[in-house]
Amino acid sequence: MTGTTVAVALLALAAAATLVFLLRGGRRPSADVPPVMRPSFSDDQLERRVLERYMAWGLVLTGFFALFLPGYFLQESHRLNEETDSFFVESVVRGEETFTTFCAECHGAEGQGGAAPSPYGNESWPAPNLTTIAVRYEDNENIADIEEFVRTTIEQGRPGTPMPTWGAAYDGPLDDQQVTDIVNWILANQVADQAQPTAAAGQSGEQLFMANCAKCHGERLQGVVGPPLNDELERHTRKTILGILQNGIYVPTGTPMPPWQAGYTYEGARYTDGALRRIIDYVESRQTGGGSDEVVAATWRDR
């Protein structure tokens, strides 16, 4: 039973008791005597017994309300907080479903980052990690309210990027409640600390490659589910390769290249630029000018 129900019940009981008292306070003459001629209390009764009864009931009711109203007031903030928490939980549940439908394709199922098709070509556009927004922008002097920043971004989108307009007020497909639900889900899934990239001190470029890249690109750089890398420096500059390692590559019809650095990575920060450059050094040292035609065909047949 909620506090509000208890309060209403007590007030109803007090009102009923008062009504009973008033009805029993006077005499009940026969119905055939006109009201104006019905006998009433004597002066002695009015000044003693009846007056004392009224005063006693007034004292009882005064004491009741003196205790009840402060108690109800003290519980009100708790009741309101419970209602607010209940609304928020329901909103987060709806927000997860809405996020999965409209946002997970680019930002990942858990909002930890991914990629979207670039509006400027066939390359990928990194979709940011949404679980670290509070950490990333907590000291940003241009953003006073993280919640409002997230809401505005969802409603209005980001022109010039794959992030579309979602708010109905800006001709998007989502109404205000759906936007609020997504915002609440994102804020409810923030992580306390943003993972920091490691320099992988003591690990060579070859060790880093074998631990992280060989399962897709092959121990001999011949390509497996990823493309062969033994001619990578003929196709890309070192700066471009570093960008690919940092942000990954989105391939809608094949296996995507995961990002390996903070900000956009699905699993958190991995390696610093220095560690990624050691991988590039190793790849550069293994360049042979091309891979097996059969391997290349098998790797990219379904892309």
Image (tube, grey):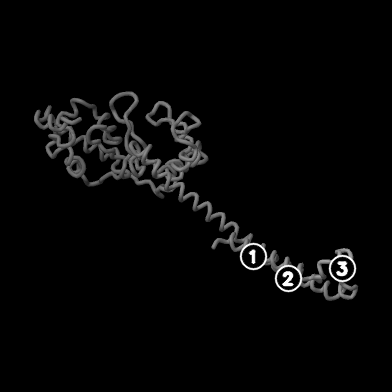
Q: Residues within 10 Å of mark 2 (few under 14, many from 20)?
A: few
Q: Quadrant of residue 270?
A: top left
- Give the total number of marks visible in the rendering: 3
The residue type indicated by label 2 comes to Val
Q: Secondary structure at mark 2?
A: helix
Q: Who is closer to the viewer here, 28 or 279?
A: 28
Q: Who is closer to the viewer here, 232 or 119?
A: 119
Q: Residues within 10 Å of mark 1 (few under 14, many from 20)?
A: some
Q: Who is closer to the viewer here, 246 or 172?
A: 172
> Which dot marks residue 10?
1
Query: In the shown orientation, is residue 271 left or right of residue 79?
Result: left
> Which dot marks residue 60?
2
Quadrant into which the N terminus falls: bottom right
Query: In the shown orientation, is residue 286 left or right of residue 165?
Result: left
Separation of disc 2 and disc 3 at Cα? 30 Å
Q: Residue at x 22, y 38 (%)?
A: 278
The residue type indicated by label 1 comes to Leu
> Which dot marks residue 38?
3
User: Farthest residue in the front direction?
Assistant: 32
Query: In the shown orientation, is residue 250 left or right of residue 228?
Result: right
The residue type indicated by label 3 comes to Arg
Query: In the shown orientation, is residue 48 left or right of residue 157?
Result: right
- Residue 2: give x, y in percent of width and height: 55, 61
